[in-house]
Image: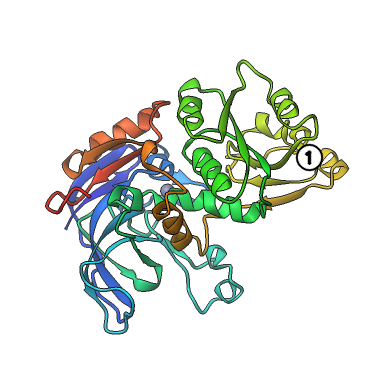
Amino acid sequence: MKALVLERVGELSLRDIDLPSDLGAGDVRIRLHTVGICGSDVHYYTHGRIGDFVVNAPMVLGHEASGTIIEVGTDVRGLKVGDRVCMEPGVPDLTSRASKLGLYNVDPNVTFWATPPVHGVLCPETVHPAAFTFRLPDNVTFAEGAMVEPFAVGMQAAKRAQISPGDTAVVMGAGTIGIMTALAALAGGCSKVLISDLSAEKLAIAGGYPGITGINIRETSLQEAVAQATEGWGADVIFECTGAQAAMHDLFRIVRPGGTVVFVGLPPEPVAIDISGATARECRMETVFRYANVFDRALDLIAAGKVDLKPLLSGTFAFEDSIAAFERAAEARPQDVKLQIRVDTESEAE
Ligand SMILES: [Zn+2]
């Protein structure tokens, strides 16, 4: 079938490729509708690798997906042909030690769409375990369904933070994941979120949400802004979403004594952090790797109107224009939060 294939660094093609299509007893077959472009897809396109994951063979991109079920395996319960769904792209070994501990996201044997050597889903159809396929509520669109995956990272960060009602949070970095994290923090009970960045455009998008205040660190010191917002006490939770060394410098000056720092951004190289500063405040520190058990909760929040991802959709491209979509994504325009590709041109818009 025709798919968007990353042939090697910097070279994409829309061409026929053989993809696995056997339907197991616990699987569903899905006709893809919408697939979002993730920073990781773009990074494989522009750099050919992320850490130890290297593109050594042609690979189909795309892991943020929604679609419609067109076939179900014999053991599938609770999903049927015609259901509109979104999919969790990581499939763990459910018999693994990590899965049994409830940590399936850190199962070393997890297979994850569009992470070499596993193909993604920028293609017309895919087969996926029903256990990692989630029905979209009627009032959730395919476009929103395909945004659940990046939002799930924010959900995992909010979960790891163990937010208490009324907490003040700071999100460092107003990129896609930063904004998703801010929305999850508010949905999780934070009374307000300060979000910092160098980009006025990104801050304007984030600050368009009630409860989120943008801090442009070109103009304002984050430390002063947090002190002002918390009467000098510090924020209850800091979500570090930049992965940048410069941001690490401020972390333990803006968190309150006994507060929590959640590391969401991935530094490309090891970074230095101020352990003495953390110790003096007896901070709790948490890390986030993808997500576990949050897709259904994310969908419930969207359906309930408590989280609105629609303002984050910056552009939609036709499947035939997939390469142009990736070129636009690689430009990294500051006002682009999420670009999506509409794979299915036959069915209804929503
Ligand atoms: Zn993603």
Can you say whether 198 is above or below 254 in the image? above
Q: Secondary structure at mark 1?
A: strand
Q: Is mark 1 within 8 Å of ligand 1?
A: no
Front-most of 9 and 242?
242
Find residue 303 and report its image quarter. Answer: bottom left
Extreme residue toward the bottom, this view? 75
| Residue at 56% over, 44% down | 186
Q: Position of residue 253 (x, y in %)?
A: 78, 32
Is residue 171 at all visible to an observer of this figure?
Answer: no
Extreme residue toward the right, this view? 280
Can you say whether 322 is above or below 136 in the image? above
The kind of residue tagged 1 is: Arg
Q: Position of residue 154 (x, y in %)?
A: 53, 48
Q: In the image, is 199 to the left or to the right of 276? A: left
Is residue 155 at all visible to an observer of this figure?
Answer: yes
| Residue at 51% over, 79% down | 95
Count every numbered label the image shows and give the total: 1
| Residue at 78% over, 30% down | 231
Q: Which residue is mark 1?
A: 256
Q: In the image, is 183 to the left or to the right of 325? A: right
Front-most of 87 and 141?
141
| Residue at 33% over, 60% down | 136
Q: Position of residue 283 (x, y in %)?
A: 79, 47
